[in-house]
Image: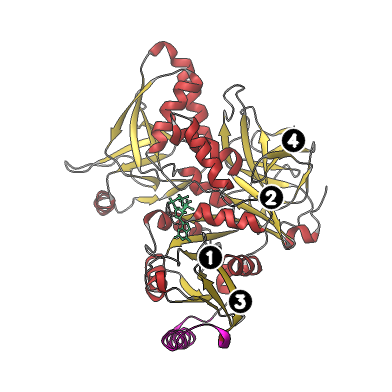
Amino acid sequence: MPTAPEDAITNGRTFAIISHPDAGKTTLTEKLLLYGGAIREAGAVKARRAQQHARSDWMEIERQRGISVTSTVLQFRYQGYRINLLDTPGHQDFSEDTYRTLLAADSVVMVLDAAKGVEEQTIKLYQVARRRQVPVFTFVNKLDRESRDPWDILEEIERILGISTFAMNWPVGMGMGFQGLFDRASREFEAFNRQNRTFDRMSLNDAPLDSHDRMQLQEDLELLEGAGEAFSQAAVTEGVLTPVYFGSAIANFGVETFLNGFLTMAPPPRPRESSAGWVAPEAPYFSGFVFKIQANMNPAHRDRVAFVRVCSGKFERNMPVAHVQSGRTIRLAQPQQFMAQDRAIIDEAFPGDVIGIHDTGLLHIGDTLSEKPDLRFVGFPRFSPEHFAEVELKYTLKHKQYQRGLDELVQEGLVQRYRPEDLGPQVFLGVVGPLQFEVLEYRLKQEYGVEVTLRPLGYRMARWVVEGPAEFELGRFDRVRTVIDDEGQRVLLLEDERSLERLLERHPSLRVAESSPLR
Ligand code: G4P
């Protein structure tokens, strides 16, 4: 069984970028790919998006699927590192998929808009990263525009996200008065040339700063040294301290400093928890898990691709591996890897890499593929949906197609499905982002020829019952419903935190979880 060569492990970096829409994730991604030589011109990632946008009437949905085909993961090389950048759809197509992609990352880059600070979707995504205790790196973007005070941004990150910060560089001026960045590690100044949007590196003494800016910088640096958190790589690795870089993605300002710092501090592939203990990337056998399934990427021939994150050993094309959940041995004949502009068949892959595998319906999210048949990766949660609806088939004659479509889309992780506790005929669905309901309707119609009616329900969260009474007495004002999920677990659908609190007060033996492990 092949082991991964040592340098393939130490040089591997697998990370995801999280941000609120419009903070600059696409622009930063593009600049990082430019450094890696994975694309030749700035605008390529965006242009592809725009093209897909224009081509379709159902643009959001098509766009979403179009993007994820090629950019679920982008691999590029830079200064001896093999970098896998995982795309986390973050716009209106925010979904459980977005959360699950974070399970495949070893570290996270959080992009903030310097004028807006910590925004809603960043908080949600951060919380998932935090649960896994992965290192988080922050890029405060759009410094070329009027921004908030950098102290204010650091304070907000600490207060809202509860993580300590360490400023790696420090801005002088902002917006029209933005002069450049002081790099605390090299103690050099990067002066911003507004006219041609370039920068020059120089010693602080040579920096073209007026006396006011110079004094302000000195003061800020003293404050940072005195009051700020001390830098600790251990704290970064544990995810309790985030190195913060200021810059501007569009002006490519501070991006290189960020990339170099990030690659040095971010961890190589980390061990993963399995039923047989922790699996180190150095383990002498291939293993990996499915973190995303994309069905019917090409409607002409119903294909389905499972994205597998390699955890240990060396993956080789055509190698027979055990699909642990079904007990079958499969041969991975046409594994694909995804580059910025296309996908290619690959012959080998190493820990941290992501491979795409054609699948006929055998693989599910969270499944393990391994040369060692008795190993099963654990820790794949289903997250609480935030929107719920009751679904009904419009024309009952199509029941079979409806059932199949719904089964496949549930497996893919597009929606969660629940039934009433008394096992009545109703079917309830839950999603993280409301666009997923539109995607569901659209795909059922396009791919399975089935029309459904979705009746929105007023619930906003789900809690899995870990322990609790056989029956809940519900009061007149309780807006709670008990249902059973596809795994046979009891789930409470609730309108808000307050209804949960009331229920917990009334049933002291009740214990609930915010997420639930997949099978
Ligand atoms: P997202 O993927 O996080 O949603 O953000 P994206 O990169 O698409 O950027 C959102 C908008 O912010 C874009 O403008 C982009 O050009 C702009 N932007 C990104 N980085 C910077 C920066 O460092 N400084 C400034 N001033 N703007 C930045 P847009 O008008 O929506 O699109 P476009 O017409 O510029 O392409």
Start-end of magenta stretch = 205-230
In primary-sequence order, the first of circles 2 and 4 is 4
Could you say which disc has been placed on residue 353 in the image?
2
Which amino acid type is shown beneath numbered disc 2? Asp
| Real-space CA distance between mark 1 and mark 3, rounded to the nearest whole angstrom | 14 Å
Which amino acid type is shown beneath numbered disc 4? Leu
Q: Are marks 2 and 1 in contact (CB under 8 Å)?
A: no
Label 4 residue SS: loop
In primary-sequence order, the first of circles 2 and 1 is 1
Q: Is residue 413 visible?
A: no
Q: Residues within 10 Å of mark 3 (few under 14, many from 20)?
A: some
Q: Quadrant of the C terminus?
A: top right
> What residue would you read off at disc 3?
201
**The one of 156 and 117 positioned closer to us in this rendering:** 117
Could you say which disc has been placed on residue 197 in the image?
1
Which amino acid type is shown beneath numbered disc 3? Arg
| Real-space CA distance between mark 2 and mark 1, rounded to the nearest whole angstrom | 35 Å
Residue ranking furthest to the front? 195
Q: Is mark 2 within 8 Å of ligand 1?
A: no
Which amino acid type is shown beneath numbered disc 1? Arg
| Real-space CA distance between mark 1 and mark 4, rounded to the nearest whole angstrom | 47 Å
In primary-sequence order, the first of circles 1 and 4 is 1
Q: Quadrant of residue 59?
A: top left
| Real-space CA distance between mark 4 and mark 3, rounded to the nearest whole angstrom | 49 Å
Image-based side of 394 in relation to 246, left or right:
left
